[in-house]
Amino acid sequence: MEDILTEIPPPSRFFLEDLNNFCPPSPPLPSPFLLFSTSNREKFSRPSLLIIAMSSPSLQIFHHVSSKTLVGTVILPEIPFSGNSVEPSLKDKSCNIYALNEDDNLIMIVSVQYPVTAERSHAVAKLLIGEQVIPEKVLILDSIRSSNFRGRLSPDEAFAFKLESSAERKAKADGHQDSPLVKCADYLPSGSVVDGLAAALLSRCQLKKIRGTLCVSWPEVGVSVISLVKSLLLKDVLSHVKHIDMKKLEEGFLKLGRSKDYLLEFELYT
């Protein structure tokens, strides 16, 4: 006679892995795509520099650069357009692409203003680097969370750190005049972590042997970090942009800072 107290029970039908066997798989999400607003897309397929802005400071800085021209957008099908304004706004959930001409060099700026999940990061990175756009150099601007940093970060002091692809380091070793792209920033300390879309973009640069630099700033929001990122860009990257009105930047930050929802949304992808 079986001992009901010590006998191993049969597998439960309520185990999560068993329940999943009876659920139809979720339909795959459509691939992201790049939509240019001009028929001459070849003109924008090989920029000398591609800047991908994801951090709050970098988005606000490029929003106030008046010399840029809107040339396209990246569509992520799961991100709704409802609530977006007609004119580009920092409150929109969008990913616009702008062109910035510097003499004969074409600089393209991608303003990523919606959350990109880890599962979608590689698809977006592939779209922006090496597939439809093949840049000579790439600069990625993101923020770092204190939980990803090995050490302590003071909320009252602004910092910027960088990581580089092998091609960028080789260009520096070969004595290229424009290398490193970001000169006034220390390397990210060993043990610190960068994840999400920023990591996928730098990995894409490494895979395609493109000169890539990832620059992360701290804190995620604030006037001090806006000033720091602006200084790095104007000194090392966009020397031809003569003036960006810091007063307008501060006013824009304070206006957005009054909206608690904006800051909560931004924590999802910075």
Image (cartoon, helix red, strand yellow):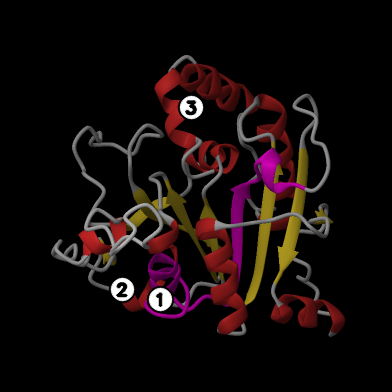
Q: Position of residue 198 (x, y in %)?
A: 56, 59
Q: Are marks 1 and 2 in contact (CB under 8 Å)?
A: yes
Amino acid type, residue under disc 1 in the picture:
Ser
Mark 2: secondary structure = helix
**Residue ID at (26%, 48%):** 79
Residue 248 quadrant: top right
Viewer-closest of 104 and 80? 80
Q: Disc 1 versus disc 2: distance between alpha carbons?
A: 6 Å
Residue at (33% x, 46% y) in the render: 94
Disc 1 secondary structure class:
loop
Which of discs 3 and 2 lies nearer the camera? The answer is: 3
x and y percent of residue 97 in the render? 39, 56
Q: Is residue 94 left or right of residue 101?
A: left
Residue tagged 3: 263
Q: Nearer the viewer, residue 235 or 113?
A: 113
Task: Give the position of the N terminus as an image quadrant.
Answer: bottom left
Is residue 174 shown left or right of residue 75? right
Q: Residues within 10 Å of mark 1 (few under 14, many from 20)?
A: some
Could you tell me which quadrant the C terminus lies in?
Answer: top right
Amino acid type of disc 3?
Leu
Disc 3 vs disc 1: which is toward the camera?
3
Give the image quarter of residue 21: bottom left
Question: Distance of mark 3 from mark 2, alpha carbons?
Answer: 35 Å
> Which residue is labeled 1 in the image?
45
Tell me the quarter of the picture where residue 177 sits: bottom right
x and y percentages locating residue 63 in the rendered image: 47, 39
Q: Which residue is mark 2?
A: 41
Identify the residue at image location x=84%, y=85%: 174
Q: How many marks?
A: 3
Is residue 230 in view? no
Magenta segment: 122-149
- Can residue 268 be seen in the rendering of this structure? yes
